[in-house]
Structures are given as structure tokens and as C-alpha cells.
Amino acid sequence: MDKSNSSENVIFPKGQELPEMFSKYFSGKAWLSMLVGRENEFNCPIGNVTFEPGCINNWHKHPGGQILLVTGGRGYYQEEGKPAQELKPGDVVLIPSNVKHWHGAAHDSWFEHLSVETNISAGPVEWLEPVADEDYKKLK
């Protein structure tokens, strides 16, 4: 198992385990440390999200878009109708407004990214159905 992004090797604080109101949209445990909050003049919240191995989030959409900056481990990102792409430290994912997608850790690796919410005045994230187990299990 890849431990390159276990709690001992993080760039930003791991934060708190997600509360149930958000964790219900994840397949395992994830942690969040808000680096830039929602309530400031920048209107651009940034959170450090850490996923345990095998944890991914449900399909979802951001009305204002999202940027992912991968800082550790190995994971995946997939847009609806496209193949999943492997993510590693240094990768940047630009997610346009209202594009249905999911992201999270590989089966055997911790995964960490900065989540940058853009144009938050467009509205909150819309959480959708879980990723089909058989689709995720196909990923190496």
C-alpha cells in the first residue's frame, strides 16, 4: 500500500473527519482542512481534502466550477461520459461549471488535493448518486 500521503507526510493539515452531512456522499473516510474559508473578500474557498485508500466521492456538480490541485498520493478524476484519469502530485484539474464528475483515492493509496471552489455565488455543490462499484473496481 502506498503510504506516501499518510498522515505523517502531508503538506497542509489533514483537518477533521468530514461530518455526516458531507461524509454520506463519500465511500469511506475523508478529512477536510479549510485553508481559505467562504466568508471573506476573496469569494474562493480552498480546502485540503484527504481521502483514505479506496475512498471516493459521489458524482456531483459545482454550479461555479472547481479546480483540484493534487498534493499527494494517487487518485482518480472522472467526468460523466469520459474515461477516468489517474491523478498524482502536481496534477491540476479544471472542472467547468455544472460538469458531472467524481474524484477520490486509488484502491491502494492515500490521496490528497486542494479543492478550490470557483464562482461560489453561482450556488452550492449538487450531490448526486454514488459511483457504481463495478466501475470503480475496474480502475487499477
Image: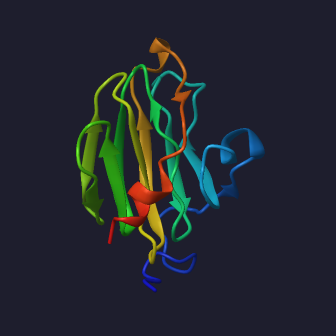
Q: Residue furthest top?
A: 122
| Residue 28 horizontal side relative to residue 137, left or right | right
Tell me how the rendering is colored: rainbow
Is 13 located above or below residue 39 in the figure?
below
Left or right: 26 as drawn, with respect to 135: right
The mark total stands at: 0
Residue shown at 47% from the left, 23% from the top: 43
Question: In this rendering, is residue 68 above or below 3?
Answer: above
Observer-nearest of 50 and 78: 78
**Residue visible at 44% across and 75% down?**
109
x%, y% of residue 51? 53, 62
Image position of 140 with respect to 12: above or below? below
Q: Residue furthest right?
A: 20
For the point 33% across and 65% down, which residue is it? 139
Give the percent coordinates (x, y) of residue 93.
27, 45
Task: Please tell me whether residue 136 is drawn above or below residue 57 in the rendered image.
Answer: below
Q: Quadrant of residue 8?
A: bottom right
| Residue 88, horizontal then vertical, whole percent | 29, 66
From the image, which quarter does the C terminus lie in?
Answer: bottom left
At 25% across and 50% down in the image, what residue appears? 92
State the image coordinates of residue 28 (x, y, percent, origin top left): 62, 60
In the picture provided, is 97 more to the left or to the right than 41? left
Question: 40 or 6: nearer the eye?
Answer: 6
